[in-house]
Image (spheres, rainbow, N blue to C red):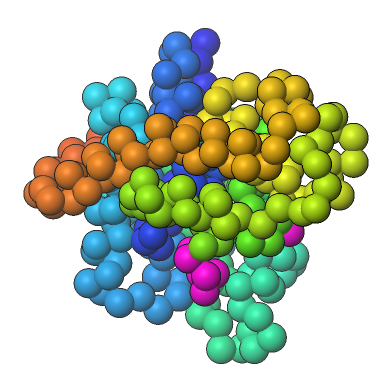
Amino acid sequence: MGKKIFSGVQPTGNLHLGNYIGAIKNFVDLQNETDNQCIFCVVDLHAITVKQDPNELKKNIRETTAAFLASGIKPEQSIIFNQSLVPAHAEGSWILACVARMGWLNRMTQFKEKAGKDKEKASVGLYIYPVLMAADILLYDATHVPVGEDQKQHLELSRDIAQKFNSDFNSLNFLKVPEPLIQKSFSRIMSLKDGRKKMSKSDPSDLSRINLKDGKDEIVNKIKKAKTDNDPMPASDDKLNERPEIENLLGIYSSLSNQNLKSTINDFSGKNFSDFKSKLAEIIVEKISPISDEIRRLEQDPKFIDDILKSGSKKAEKIAKLKVEELKKIVGF
């Protein structure tokens, strides 16, 4: 029996290679596994936990959807939708917020990181958005959720909320307790300028990342300028963690080649960094350029993208609305 998978991507714009390797590529693989049911959401309600320009947000929702489609997520196989078109998410989130405990939310490290020193000025939405994330997952009876290391804590919260709701209302297994699907390799792609920092659109240097919409010349130039070190190409993975930039570049190559890290190290052991970088740029161009071209093509037809989201949202609403109606009965509405 296949898995029922739910995952979401925030429409923050300027998607990059880290988003592709760390999430979207994995979504396509999961979709293509026999018997899996996949639901992929553009989580625009999460996006407004920090202030957004409305026009930019609309553009970013379409861009994220275009990236899903261009990467190989198929609307005839998977449900693709945006959160704000399915009211059940907000409604279910309120009911689950009344089950979640303050102590659980106070332990969420991501709020502390995102709110920074002046957390009194952070939005209430930023504080409680892990409960909305729990609703996203639990309303679809998801059995598995692909998560990176930075989201594991939020999935644990979803599991706690499900178990507490089931216990409080004597409703055994009504809310399914989801399992994490943790990508074992290459889940975190790091900056091309600093191997200890995650690749991010917020980095002021565009040379720190490969954007999904970069052209061939930009990709080649960024890889050529990517930080390395003065030692030769490694002959094994011993002490590779002491060379974060090299480990990151080898990881990118391995992921896009669909091979393990040891095979990549064997392929390039004894060769020059320039040879490796040339091959790395080549494979990034080969894998990313068709996606980039398709994103640009799709963005020329916003109605097509909007229609995909509307169609997917109708399918999602059927599932989520039914679950919320059952939730309401259980709590006594």
> Taking 233 as reference, is 264 left or right?
left
Q: Quadrant of residue 237?
A: top right
- Camera-nearest residue between 259 and 234: 234
> Taking 31 as reference, is 305 left or right?
left
Residue 204 is a magenta residue: yes
Image point (22%, 72%), residue name = 55
Image point (12%, 43%), residue name = 304
Residue 309 is a magenta residue: no
Place of residue 92 in the rendered image (x, y in percent of width and height, measured from the top left): 43, 53
> Taking 111 as reference, is 140 left or right?
left
- Camera-nearest residue between 60 and 98: 60
Place of residue 83 in the rendered image (x, y in percent of width and height, measured from the top left): 34, 52
Place of residue 184 in the rendered image (x, y in percent of width and height, measured from the top left): 69, 32
Task: State the quadrant of the C terminus.
Answer: bottom left
**Magenta residues?**
196-206
- Camera-nearest residue between 197 and 98: 197
- Camera-nearest residue between 98 and 60: 60
Mainly helix, strand or loop, the magenta region? loop
Relative to 300, residue 271 above or below: above
> Does residue 121 show up?
yes
> Does residue 310 show up?
no
Image point (24%, 62%), residue name = 59
Q: Quadrant of residue 67?
A: top left
Place of residue 332 in the rendered image (x, y in percent of width and height, measured from the top left): 45, 51
> Taking 313 as reference, is 154 left or right?
right
Image point (45%, 75%), residue name = 50
